[in-house]
Image: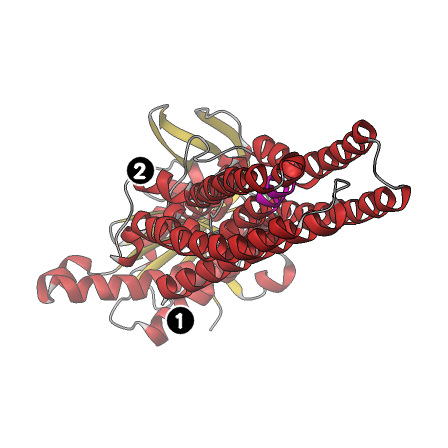
Amino acid sequence: MLRRRVQGLLTGTLIATNVIGALVVVGLAALLMPAPGMSGDLVRVTAIAVPVYVVSAVVVGALWGTRGALRTLRWAAEGRTPTDAERAASLRVPLRLTLVQAVLWGVATVVFGALAALVQPRVVLTELLVVAFAGVVVCAIAYLASEFILRPYAALALAGTSPARRLSGGVNLRMLLFWCLGTGVPVAGLVVTAILAWVRGDVSTTKLAVSVIVLGLVVLCFGLLVTVFTARAVVNPIRSVQHALGRVRAGDFAVEIPVYDGTELGLLQAGFNGMAAGLAERERLRDLFGRHVGEDVASEAMRTTTAELGGTVRTVSVLFVDLIGSTALAASRPPEEVVGLLNRFFAVVVDEVDHNHGLVNKFVGDAALAIFGAPARLEDHATLALSAGRAIARRLAAEVPECPAGIGVATGEVVAGNVGDLRRFEYTVIGDPVNEAARLTELAKNVEARLLASWTAIESADEAEAGHWKATEAVTLRGRGKPTTLATPRT
């Protein structure tokens, strides 16, 4: 369908441009150029030669230009990706069609100049000038129209590529060409008209004025047409980038611009696509990074210009959750079922820790360590940790009864930072509260509520949260030299 549509548009456009060129020749030769009037013999010869040559040129142009262009674009009809040579040749099709028109009108210039030399030699120069001027008009229209018509093929040729260099003439060459076609050549025609009138001295003032006025109007109209097409050829790719930038600014990194220009503008479009793909990849990596280490850690790492080991002393609250009977669970169930249960178990933990602005720092087998107060500072970290512990205990009992767990909460000073080697490290917290929370978790497995906290954490919490807890007994935890007062939720 695309081939038929493009072939029809190209053929129709080439026919129309050649007809326009023929009309320009007749009009300029008969009415405008200040030269001796055309004899009856020349008029009759021209009236016969123009239609014959136009029809012949249209047939030759269609066979030579259009068919040749479609042969160059055969890869698209075959539904395959073009090679580099085919891609470059496809982008040069508008220039090739323009060269075909230039050759045909060059021949026309020679033919009609020869006819004028045989029939009426005094108007040879006039005939050559008007045919050449019409040829320039036809070539300009052919190039602009074919470049616009073949844009779908250019987009297909450049799809999925990021060329390192332009694949056709640059913007500077295009602008210079359009200036020559839209301004330089028409103005040169005016200058030649004035020179001919001056040299011959047999042109009336009225005819010279009419010639200059009409040629001036042609310059204005044709120059405007070329300028409009030039502006569209330059502005449209820039607008596509501008529109896509707005979508990227709104968070849509999947945007991709169709690349249909082989100049620096096409490189701009391809460069934007590469940038958008890089941003999408960066966002994906950031999301994965955040899922592995936590959003707060990921954000902190991206704000830091250099990776450093070590950390800072922080007062935080630590929540430790450990599954009860994980060995028996793994021995009595298939591995796929065990993984599914663990995922449901950890989903509850992550949900409640996130809800209370904490960070699940790591998963250790069937246990999880959560931090409240690092890396993002929290003034009410103890309140949030205790609230998360109560919510996790309640939800696990209701939603995942197959996975009972002990939960411990402790508060104190830790060192929060990167631990490991510069080649491979992780963010974590090290200090007495971490060990204390782990020991409280072991004891919590044997109490009804499955949840224990240190009284230090209760004292650090606000009054409303502290009211949900009660002190029980003082116990010297394994590995510690002083007793810890235990607290359990009120029933």
Q: Say if the magenta span includes residue 216.
A: no
Decide whether residue 136 is among the magenta residues.
yes
Instruction: Give residue 396's position: percent from left, percent from top.
Output: 35, 69
Question: Can you give x and y, in whole percent of width and height, for residue 14 in the image?
Answer: 49, 55
Residue plotted at (53% across, 30% down): 304
Q: Position of residue 402 (x, y in %)?
A: 24, 71
> Residue 98 shows which numbered tag?
none
Q: Is residue 440 left or right of 147 when viewed as pictured?
A: left
The residue labelled by disc 1 is: 395
- Vertical placement of 391 versus 58: above or below? below
Label 1, label 2: how far apart the Cα atoms are: 61 Å
Give left or right: position of 125 versus 407: right
Other residues around mark 1 within 10 Å, as few (<14) / some (14–19) / many (≥20): some
Q: Secondary structure at mark 2?
A: helix
Whether residue 489 is visible here, answered yes or no, is yes
Q: Are marks 1 and 2 in contact (CB under 8 Å)?
A: no
Q: Residue at x 43, y 64 (%)?
A: 8
Left or right for 9, reference 315: left
What amino acid type is highlighted by mark number 1?
Answer: Arg
Q: Position of residue 237 (x, y in %)?
A: 57, 47
Which of the two discs, 1 and 2, sits closer to the camera?
2
* Quadrant hosting residue 426: top left
Q: Main secondary structure of the magenta part?
A: helix
Q: Is 293 drawn above or below residue 383 in the view shown?
A: above
Taking the image as shown, residue 111 lies to the left or right of residue 81, namely right
* Mark before the other along the chain sequence, 1 or 2: 2
Outermost residue on the right side: it is 205
CA neighbours of label 2 inside 10 A, class few (<14), some (14 to 19), many (20+): few
Where is 395 relative to 225, above or below?
below
Region in magenta: 129-137
